[in-house]
Image (tube, rainbow, N blue to C red):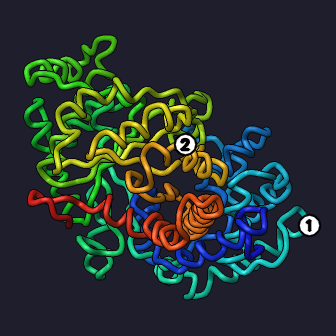
Amino acid sequence: MHDDHLLPAEPGVRAIARELYGHAKGLPLISPHGHVDPAILADDQPFPDPARLIVVPDHYVTRMLASQGVAPADLGVPSLDGSPVETDGRTIWRRLAAQWHLFRGTPSRLWTERVLAEVFGVDGPLHADTADRVYDTIAERLASPEFRPRALFERFNLEVLATTESPLSDLGAHAKLAADGWGGPGGRVITTFRPDDLVDLDWPGWADRVAQLGAGTYAEFLDRLRERRQAFIAAGATSSDHGHPTAATLALAPQQAAALFDRALGGRAEPGDAETFRAHMLVEFARMSVEDGLVMQLHPGAVRNHNAALYARHGRDVGGDIPSPTEYVRALKPLLDELGTDPRFRIVLYTLDETAFTRELAPLAGGYPAVFLGAPWWFLDSPEGLRRYREAVTETAGFYNTAGFVDDTRAFCSIPVRHDVARRVDAGFLARLVAEHRLPLDEAAETIADLAYHLPKRVYARTVHNGASA
C-alpha cells in the first residue's frame, strides 16, 4: 500500500493530511459496534482455512459474487434446506480469485487486499494464477501461534471490542473471557444487548422466544428484559443496539401495550401491530437506558431478507438485505419529547439513507443533547461514503455530536484496516479545512485524535445516575 493511500491528490493538502494522519495512526482501536463471534476469542483456537476465515462469513464478498451468478452454496455458505454446500476451502478460494475483478473499485477489495498484505504478508495481487500461492501463504500463517485470535487482537492494537448478542444468549463465551481476564466491565471484549428477536412480531418464532425468556405477560416481559440487561452489564455491556425497519417511536399507555402483547402472544396480531410494538418498545428501552445507563444505538432502514430465495436457502445475514428510505424527524419525536434533553440518556443514530444526513440527522444531533450521529455503516462504510458523511453533517452538527468510527464487521481480520481507512479519510477532510484556512492545524490535530479514539470512548461509555460514566 502506498503511504498516501486515500489521502487527497493535491500535493499541498496531501502534505497536511499526512501530518494529521500521523496523529491518529498509532492510537488504539475502539470497536464499540460489531458482530465478531466472541467464541473466537474465548476459545483462542487457530482460525480455519483461509476461505472460512475470509470468504464464507463475509456477506459483502458472497453478495457480490452471488450477483454475478456464483451460488452462495458454492462459496461454503451454510444452507438451511440440506442442499449441498462446498466444503473444500481451496476450491472456494479459487472461485473468489477467479472472480476478483468483480470487486474493482469496491471497499471489499480495498479491505481484503490490505488484510492479505498487512495481516498475512501476502506479496502480489490476487487472481486465478496466484490463488493457490496466496492460499498456502495464509494457511501457513494461520498454523502459527502468532496468528491465534488473541495474538492478533494484541497486534491490531485493539483496546476494546464490543460483540452483539440476543438477550437469550447465555453469554458463555463472555464468561470464559472474563475468567481469563479479557471480559466483563473494563475488559477488552464486551457484549452489546440486541433485543430485536424479542420485539419484532414479524420475526418467525417470536412467541417461542418470549416463552424462552420466561415471560407470560407484558409486565413479566419487561421485567425479564431488565434482568437480562443487568446480566449484559455484568458481562461488560455499555450499550444496547436496535435494528428496526424504521425509526418509528411511540409511547403507548401500559394497558394498550399489554393488550397488544397479549394479542400477539395468542396469535391474534392485527395489521400494524408489529410496527406499533417495535415503536413502543424503543421508548421502553430508552426508559431502561435511563435506569441502567446503557447507551442506545438505533440502526434502522434495512429491508431484511429482501432476496426471498436466498433467505429460504441460507437464512438471515447472508447478503439479502436492502437499504430503504428512512424518516427520523417525526419518527423520533415521541422518544425525544420524553428523553431528548435528559442528561441520563444517550442515543446514537445510524442510517442507510444518506439523504437524511443533512436534512434530518445533523439537525437532530445539533438540537438535542442526547443525540449523537453514528458513523456510516454497512452499504456506506466506504471511503466515499465516509467523505460524504463528513461533508453532509459537519456544518450543522460539528464533529463533537458524532460518535467516532464503528467497523460493524464479522470479519475479525478486517478491523484494523477499516479503522485505518476512516482515519485516512478524516485526515483528508480536516486537511482541506486547514488548507482553506477554516481550521488551525493544531485544532485539526486535536480533532482527528478525538474522532479516532477519544469520542467513541466517551460516547459509548455507560452513563450512571450522577452523570458520570462507567
Q: In which quarter of the image is the N terminus?
A: bottom right
Residue 278 drawn at (x, y percent): 29, 29
Give the residue pinned by disc 1.
Answer: 129
Residue 110 drawn at (x, y percent): 72, 61
Classed neighbour count for the residue bearing mark 1: other residues with Cα under 10 Å, few (<14), some (14–19), many (≥20): few
Q: How many marks?
A: 2
- Whether residue 54 sits left or right of residue 297 in the image: it is right
Q: In which quarter of the image is the C terminus?
A: bottom left
Kindly identify the residue that appears in the image at 39 percent across and 56 percent down.
400
Give the residue pinned by disc 2.
Answer: 392
Residue 139 drawn at (x, y percent): 69, 77
Q: Which residue lies furthest to the front in this view?
A: 437
Amino acid under disc 1: Asp
- Tell me the number on the disc at residue 377: none
Is residue 446 something one can see in this rendering? yes
Q: Which of 253 and 413 is in front in this view?
A: 253
- Whether residue 49 sits left or right of residue 231 in the image: it is right
